[in-house]
Amino acid sequence: MQLNVLKAKIHRASVTHAELHYEGSCAIDGRLLDISGIREYEQIHIYNVNNGARFVTYAIRGEEGSGVISVNGAAAHCAQPGDLVIICAYGVCDEAEAAKYKPTCVYVDRQNQLTHTNHSMPQQAAA
């Protein structure tokens, strides 16, 4: 049996832009894509914490370190700047792989800067 499992997520990112008149997709800070393992043009699911909207689009690479999370095209009706979203990517594996697999979870602050992953400790706030 093949199972759909969580591959990676960026947890509680802040939407920085909602661009209705754009071809589509979601631009994500390239550094966050690299850390999470989400690939450019990969299908992603976005869950809006503020309004409950859930939608599917694909990731495009934003400028590294910019903190950009831009929801584009028709999906811009589902989010507005300041909304908190959870961005997830899923993969398919068999039951044996699923038993051992652990997704990569990326946690960010309100400016979409990395605080920690499920593989690292939270970074200490600057004094």
Image (cartoon, helix red, strand yellow):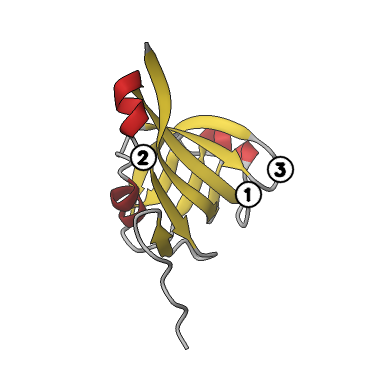
Q: Residue at x 30, y 26 (%)?
A: 97
Q: Residue furthest right?
A: 51
Check disc 1 and report its element: helix, strand or loop: loop
Q: Quadrant of residue 8?
A: top left
**Relative to the observer, which residue lies in front, 85 or 22?**
85
Residue highlighted by disc 1: 80
Foreground pick, 30 / 37: 37
**Structural crowding at the residue carrying mark 3, measured as other residues with C-alpha within 10 Å and reported as few (<14), some (14–19) or many (≥20):** few
**Disc 3 on helix, strand or loop?**
loop
From the image, tell me which residue sits under label 2: 102
Whichever of labels 3 and 1 marks the residue nearer the N terminus, that label is 3
> What is the distance, in whole Å, between disc 2 and disc 3 at their CAs?
29 Å
What is the three-letter code of the residue carrying label 1?
Gln
Residue 99 percent across, percent down from the top left: 36, 29
Q: Quadrant of the N terminus?
A: top left
- Residue ranking furthest to the top: 1
Tell me where residue 114 sits by quadrant.
bottom left
Relative to 109, does residue 81 appear above or below in the rendering?
Answer: above
Direction from residue 126 to residue 110 in the image, left or right:
right
Q: Is residue 69 visible?
A: yes
Choose mark 3 or mark 1, whichever is in front. Answer: 3
Residue situated in front as seen by the camera: 108 or 5? 5
Q: Amino acid at mark 3?
A: Asn
Task: Count up the numbered dots.
Answer: 3
Residue found at x 64% / y 37%: 77
What type is the residue that disc 2 sits on? Lys
Q: Closer to the N terminus: mark 1 or mark 2?
A: 1
Q: Earlier in the sequence, mark 2 or mark 3?
A: 3
